[in-house]
Image (tube, grey):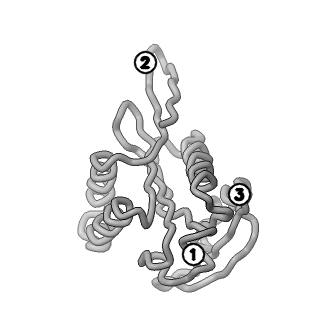
Amino acid sequence: MVQAFFRLEGLCMEWSYGIASLPGLERIWEKNIENNKGDEDWVRWRKEYIDYHMSGKSKSFLVSLDGEPVGEGTLLFEPECRTIDGRALLADGRTTANINALRIEKAYEGQGHLSRLVKLMEKHAGEAGYQRLTIGVEAHMTRNLGIYLHWGYDEFVMSEVEDGTLVLYFAKNL
């Protein structure tokens, strides 16, 4: 767990970045479902991502503020993960993993928290023997695309229409 302390107007705020505990993972998914009321996909994704994390098919990471998760990201390792859907170019279980479900609460966007989290995820993947990471971005999300390119995810891997939206995939060698 990486921790950072910031003082803001006399308040001490403790930020932490690390591998998700089961309670932390359950809490962030409660928030995701609450923020997407009525969309049953989020309920299904909650079960899938927690199962993947617990089985070792993925590793989820959290950004927390004073112990409360406010952001997340997941490294998907196995091509059998539903999001990967057998596309070994994105995750092959040996040398290539995929950064997925990267998000943070709106109030904390643009403050570098996801950059810190991605660096931690890259470090973890490298230590686990992965040599390459992939990341996807919806083509219309140009701000995110710019961020990913800035982080070094600048090798185009593939594009695909998913649920009616064009998604571009990029890679970075570790």
Secondary structure under tag 3 reads loop
* 162, above or below 119, in the image: below
The amino acid marked with disc number 2 is: Leu
CA–CA distance in space, label 2 to label 3: 37 Å
Q: Residue furthest top?
A: 10
The disc label shown at residue 11, or none: 2
**Residue 172 pos. (x, y %):** 71, 63
Residue that label 3 marks: 174
The disc label shown at residue 29, or none: none
Q: Nearer the viewer, mark 1 or mark 2?
A: 1
Q: Give the side of residue 140 with respect to residue 68, left or right.
A: right
Q: Which of the two labelled residues, at mark 1 and mark 3, occupies the earlier sequence position?
A: 1
Residue 110: quarter of image: top right
Secondary structure under tag 2 reads strand
Residue 49: quarter of image: bottom left
**Residue 41 pos. (x, y %):** 31, 73
